[in-house]
Every structure is written in C-alpha cells, then in structure tokens.
Image (cartoon, helix red, strand yellow):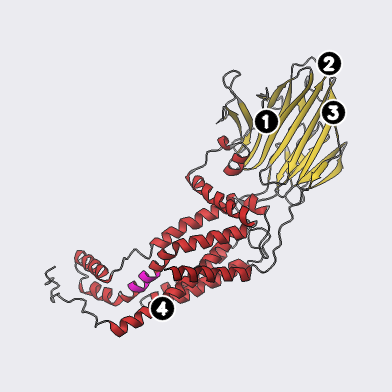
Amino acid sequence: MRKIYGWLTISITLSLFLLLGVPSWGVQTDLTYRIYQSGDYKEIEVTTALASYVFSEEKGTLHSVFLTFSPYGSKSSELVPGTKTDPVDLDRQYVANTTFPFTLLMDGTEADCVLSTPIQAYADEIIVEFKGRAGGVDFTKRFTIRNEPYYTVDMELVIDNPDGENPSSTLLMILADHTPTKSSPALVYLFDDAATEALLVPNSYTSFDGLGLMDKQTVFFLMPVGLTEAAPFSERTPAGSQRFGVSLPLTRGTTHYSFSLYGGRRRFLLMEDAGLGKLDSPGNMARMMVPVIQFLNFLYRHTGNYAWAIILFTILTRVILFPLMRKQYHSMAKMQKLQPKLKRIQERFKDDRQLLQRKMMQLYKQEGVNPMGGCLPMFVQLPILILLWKAILYSAEQIHLSPGFLWVPDLSLRDPYFILVGITTLLMILQQRMMTPMTASNTGGSQKYMGYIFPIFMAVFLYSFPAGLWLYYLLTTLSQVGQQYFVNWEMAKAKTITSMSAPAEAILDDGETDDGEDQSTD
C-alpha cells in the first residue's frame, strides 16, 4: 500500500511541476484615483480591485459604491440609493434631491466642503479628506479606502466647536435616503449584537452596533467604532422617502467619531471579519463551507497562490480517497466478471423474484463482491466537489486579489481561453475509454456512448464555471486516470497469476435441481 501511495503522489507532483513551469499573469489590482470636475463641484473616483467609489465636494459625501467585481452567480451592483451607474463606462446619474451618505445636518443645513489633496502613503491605501464649516462649527471628514477583499471603508469625523455657541445639541449624519419597496434592500439594525428590522426606542438596549441596507446579495452597513454616543434615527422626508443614519451629540471642543462602512457582497466570512457576523445567519451548507474556506486560506497563506492551494487540496483528497477509488475499480471489474453468471441466474429464476434476489446475494457473497461498493466513492466525491465549488465562490474576493495561474488571471472567474475545460474534457473521454473494457461488453449502444457524451455535455453547459473549479476537476480526473491505469495493471497481473494456479471454476448452479430447488445442506 505504501508503494501505491508513493507512485500516486510522485506521478501527480511531476505532472504539476511541468505545468507550473509556465509563468503566471495576474489581474491588475492596483488602487488608483482620479479627480475631475462635475458641475460646480470636484469629485474623486477611487478604484480598487473590487469596487469603484465616488466622493463629492457637495457636502463631502459618498455618491457611489459600485461593485465592479462580479464573481460567478453575481452581477455588478450600485449600493448607494439615488445613484444609477452604467456597468460598462461607469457613468453615474443621480436622482434629484437625494441626500447622499455622510451628509451632516446641523440645524437642517450644511455647507459644502473642500477636497484636500489625497494621501496615498501606501500602494494599497488612500485617504480622501474633506473640510467644511457650518454654523460656526468646523468639521473634517476623512475616508480611508484599502485595496483589500473586505469591502470596508473607514470614516473619521472630527467636529471642532471651540466656543460651543451652536444652538444644536445634536447633529445628524445620513447614511442613505431611499424609497422602500418589496424588491429594495431592507433596513436592518444591530442592537446588542442582534439583528432586527425594528428601530428600538432609547434605553431599551445596551449597545447600538450599526444600521444599514441588506438584501440577499449585498450589504451597505455603517458601524460605530469604539466607545461612541451615536444613536440611530429614521425619518420620512416630505418626498416620501426614508432617510436614516446616526445622531451624534454636539459638545464644546473637539470631538472625534469613528465609523466603518461595509459596502459589498453578502459573504458570511467577509462580514464576520468586518464585525458583522451577527448580521447574517448562514445555513447548513454555508457552515460546512467555513472549514473548507479556512483550509484553502491556510494553504494559500503558506504557498502564496490559490492555484497551489487548490492543487494541494486535490492531492490530499485524492490520496485520502484512493483506497475507496481502488475498491470502486475492483468492484467494477468483479461485477463485469460476474455478468455471465448473473445473466444465467436472471434467466433461470425470472419467475421467482424473491429467490432471484437471494441467489444473486449468495453469488455476491461467494465472490466477495459488494454491489454498492462502486457507488460509495462517487457519493463521497460529490459533496467534496460541491463544497469546493461553493468555497471558491465565497472566497472569490480573496482569489481575485491573489496572483494568477498560468494563462488564467483570476481563478474565481472562468478560464478566458477554456483550455482547462478542453483538457479536462479530453481526459474524461480517455478515462471512459479505459473503463470501456470493464463496462461495455454487456451494455447497449446508447448506454455505451453516454460515457463519451457526458463530458462534452458538461463542458458545454459548465464552461463558465470558475477556473479554480475546473483546475480541481482537471487534477482529479488526471489522478483518476493514473489510479485506474495502476488498478488495471494490478488486476491484469492478478488475473495472470490466478489463471496459472486456480482450479477450474465451479458450476454456478451446483446443488440446484432442474426445478430450482436447493439441494445443498447449508
């Protein structure tokens, strides 16, 4: 058995090293920005690998969060209510009289702001800052955007009220102004780490942990950071929309408030990293995916490439499953060997179904064959394939920001040239060709060729699946071909030895009379 495992591991590893000798090209994931004039105001657009943000001097607000990265099963999305973004050229259109995120209301009004020179001390981080003054109060809004897979923007608000002469005792910071509909995202609050769609009255909760919009695909949520006296509010506007955000006490002197905005996909692990784990309740499948994702991330941290992580994951699963696969191939061969005997039993006892089943089970026991033994490995492999598929989908942001693999810039998206699809399909056809001697002699024509049609069918309908999944399936098929070749050789060798030493085969119906009665003493 040790020899088998060694042969299996060496064969797969050598093949992979030959493949991975080709250089890789990754996607462009640099953080960039541009400043431009839009009407009477300057706007700054910040682009990361996942999203495009637009901030405006008009009240120092956030006008757009457009999710440009759309992994399999999702689409590009604009998260800011009142903004429509063209997914092709990112041209924005704004609904009139919309109150945009991070608008400050002091006595119902706020002056416009001035955009400071952006600070980009690091390649993956930029700070956008606005300064303004209203009602004798100076304020600074500072946004920090990072090129990370977590969809978070840090916001710091500094209020300078040295004289304390402003008549307002509180100020309001708007998060969104939207019109609720059946299809629109729901307004959700976090109180005491529990999500609710109801705005609780003051003093009925211990801590307020944030509020925002959430649907099945996306989340736009603001969280206070640290000890703060922020409190939620929601109100109807004269236009009939719902405006909500946080109220902040306005005191004498300089006050600092910190917030974190999560504007991105509804991914449990990403939200958990952002402190929003209580906002989502994952189902059983999502909970099963968590250890798989964490294991892939562990392999990625130690290899620096998700391709290697998937490769190591595949090798480990194939080595673990090899005893089952070996049993499957042997079971298939034994079942094929028993086909003539099974046919004779079926013909002889076709009128007595109960006796037919008993004789078939006796034959299986006599020959040491488990008729379901060949199915077990298939049932074991299917959940692994589904879990890895889901894990790649839910790790798409991390994979997108990692290095590419060979000609594939992003393993979370489809293979741009479908090379993995083509190679895998050819290998599956080769595998079917190797299986034909085991299964085809007593199979009808249509069933015989289904094994060749299925790989083509799968390639046509699943070509757009993530390249990482096709990489896993390619390596799995490659290992299965190698395993099957070895088992075929192993069985051929055993057959040669048996033919030289084994006595003549006993008659199947020995001990049976012509009327089918059992004359044996067992």
First-in-chain label (3 vs 1): 3
- Circle 3: element type: strand
Q: Which residues are magenta?
A: 329-334
**Between tags 1 and 4, which lies in front?**
1
Residue 469 visible within the image: no
For disc 4, the marked residue is: 437
Rendering quarter of residue 122: top right
**Label 2 to label 3, Cα distance in Å?**
17 Å
The number of callouts visible is 4
- Decide which of tag 3 and tag 4 comes sooner along the chain: 3
Q: Main secondary structure of the magenta part?
A: helix
Secondary structure of the residue carrying numbered label 1: loop
Q: Quadrant of residue 197?
A: top right
Front-most of residues 389 and 483: 483
Going from N to C along the chain, the mark reached first, 2 or 4, is 2
Q: Is residue 77 left or right of residue 160?
A: left
Find disc 2 in the rendering and name its residue.
Answer: 163
Q: Give the residue pinned by disc 3.
A: 132
Which badge, 2 or 1, is on the more N-terminal residue? Answer: 2
Whether the magenta-drawn stretch holds residue 332 is answered as yes
Crowdedness of circle 4 by 10 Å Cα count: few (<14), some, many (20+)? few
Could you tell me how far apart the alpha carbons at marks 2 and 1 are, in whole angstroms? Answer: 27 Å
Q: Nearer the viewer, mark 2 or mark 3?
A: 2
Say the numbered circle drawn on residue 165. none
The answer to whether residue 115 is left or right of residue 24 is right
**Which quadrant holds the N terminus?**
bottom left
Q: Amino acid at mark 2?
A: Asp
Q: Any magenta on residue 28? A: no
Residue at (57%, 35%) from the top-left corner?
A: 279
| Badge 3 density bin: few <14, some 14–19, many ≥20, Cα 10 Å | some
